Image (cartoon, rainbow, N blue to C red):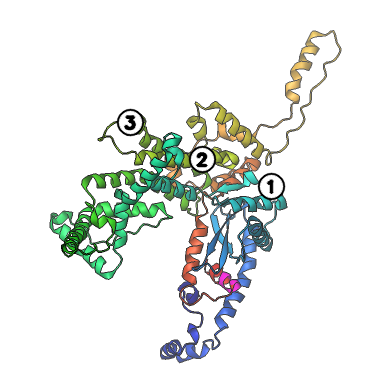
Amino acid sequence: MWLVNRNHPLSELTTPDFREMMRFANPEAEAALWVSNTSVSTFVMRLFRSIRPQVIDTLSGSVSKIHVSFDGWTTKGGKRGFFGVVAHFADAAGIIRDLPIDLPELAGAHTGEAIAKAISTTLSAYGITSDRLGYFVLDNATNNDTAIAALAREYEFESAHRRLRCSCHTLNLIGQAIIFGTNKDAYGNTQEQYNTEEQYMREWRKDGPIGVLVDVINYIKTPQQYELFRGYQRLANNNLPAEGRLKVLEPVKPVVTRWNSYYAAFERATKLQAAYNLYAEHHINRVILEDAHAAQRNNKRPDAPNWMRSTGLRAADWAVIAEYQDCLEPLKYATKRLEGRSKDGKYGAIYEVIPVFEYVLSKLEARARPFEHVDFNAHAEAPEDHLNVNLRAAWSKANDYYNKLDDSPAYYAAVCLHPYYKNYCDVAWADKADWLTSANASFQQLWAAYKPQQARQRYTTAPSSNNIDEAIIAILSRNNDREAPLDEFERWKTQEPQWTQEQYNADGNPVQYWIQLLPKYPHLAQFAIDIMTIPASSSDCERLFSELGDLLEPKRRALGSELLAALQLVRS
């Protein structure tokens, strides 16, 4: 197993050096080693085939429905495409399990129909039938919509209810909107001014404080530049008192597709602001001298990045960077809250989505509020509107996702059924009666699939009698003849105490909570367990692909898809 876990070549056991090392340690151990290059592969496949029935048994023993997340991944160069499939459920002890179960290679176009076929094959292989199948948590790709629609026809469920969106993927889009702000509707300009505003924003992204900082960071990419930057960190430290000196650190490089990498880059840069200023000043002064030298000889100016012919990053520029960092900070907390899931199900679960996104929206609104009455064109000293534009774009993206939560009643149900959040929506939406009415109607539709049918109410026909007392008794007895049981949800909501924050932070496992309540609320508890086990994101797929990328390096790119899947799933 250490070959698999440490990403060593599968043929390593047969190499002369390894066998000599084992012979030195223990000649008997060396004699017991496999001699064939295919022995490890054969063993892994045999191990995988022996584990799969155990996985199927584990899935069949789950106390919840089995929810699924999947995502596509392409190898470097785009030659091979895989789909990671992760099952999410609770075992009999109420422990949340996020288990990778398949890694099919998908040839050809990743159409919704092709994805649906691959997922259906996986579900069948693991015995996940329609009555055991729960919800799908996926990113916003349109082919996922098509895939779920196809699976809905096959497994007979309502696709809009079961197709949930990865909350962390949406947070990433919101973060990118804050940084890049490409939503034209956020400009707040007339149609005739769109092109001018778009050109301004394009130039600002390139040559504004953020663009300059990113260019400076990305210029540090050779051993010489790294050492130069370290030297300026040491020089900057010399100007600080001993207790305020910083550790010499590497720059954090931002990745275009990940807003959190920009946040980390800004955070590191503001910490090393003095060193960055010295580093940039060094290159700016060097280019000034080189340009002057070229001018004296009537030569063409040497090539240099734009920032080396600028004023660098001034105090006002660093203030802008710090402001963007502050705007991104709520997303950092939100992502941590939604992407990671412990065994007790706390955080990273669906019941966190509505409260967290209301927090994000409120923070974006608070940030944008000071700009509401600003005339950015009033005079030369008026503030620039880039942050206002980007905040509006980010709010629009967050609000779009928030509104889509209405597509599935599972989000609202998860909040209502959590012992800590049970009254959250009633309080947060107290001034939005129409929201509550609509959400409660959808909740009741979902709850109806679990709760027992109420018995038909029976009434006693009043006898034809002149006796007044007998007539009155006949009417009053109707109340005693009613056989409709109390609704479990209303009984739980009104009679069971709400968790305190201390209970929630201590050992608040909502799945175990509902398992304990199964005898008292058998139908509601099963409903709650099925909902509470839904993850808030498909981050487990990303982690799977990160490990898969390591597995394929450096000498495993030619591995067959079945062996590759076995290697990854065995170590998962």
Q: Secondary structure at mark 3?
A: loop
Q: Residues within 10 Å of mark 1 (few under 14, many from 20)?
A: some
* Residue that numbered label 1 is attached to: 157
For the image shown, how many numbered marks are present on the structure? 3
Does the stretch in magenta take in 476?
A: no
Does the stretch in magenta take in 564?
A: yes
The magenta stretch is 561-565
Label of residue 375 in the image: 3
- Identified at 45% across, 50% down, the residue is 172
Task: Tell me the CA gap for discs 2 and 3.
Answer: 27 Å
Q: Quadrant of residue 517?
A: top right
Q: Secondary structure at mark 1?
A: loop
Q: Compare residues 166 and 571 and report the one nearer the observer.
A: 166
Q: Position of residue 305 (x, y in %)?
A: 28, 59
Of circles 1 and 2, the one toward us is: 2
Q: Earlier in the sequence, mark 1 or mark 2?
A: 1
Amino acid, disc 3: Asp
- Identified at 45% across, 90% down, the residue is 16
Asked if 456 appears above or below 475 in the picture, the reply is: below
* Residue that numbered label 2 is attached to: 400
Q: Earlier in the sequence, mark 2 or mark 3?
A: 3
Q: Viewed as shown, does residue 189 lie left or right of 43?
A: left
Q: Earlier in the sequence, mark 1 or mark 3?
A: 1
Task: Tell me the CA gap for discs 1 and 2.
Answer: 25 Å
Can residue 549 be seen by looking at this rendering?
yes
Would you say the residues marked 1 and 3 are in contact, meaning their CB atoms lie under 8 Å apart? no
Direction right: furthest residue: 464
- Identified at 65% across, 67% down, the residue is 53
Q: Viewed as shown, does residue 284 lie left or right of 537?
A: left
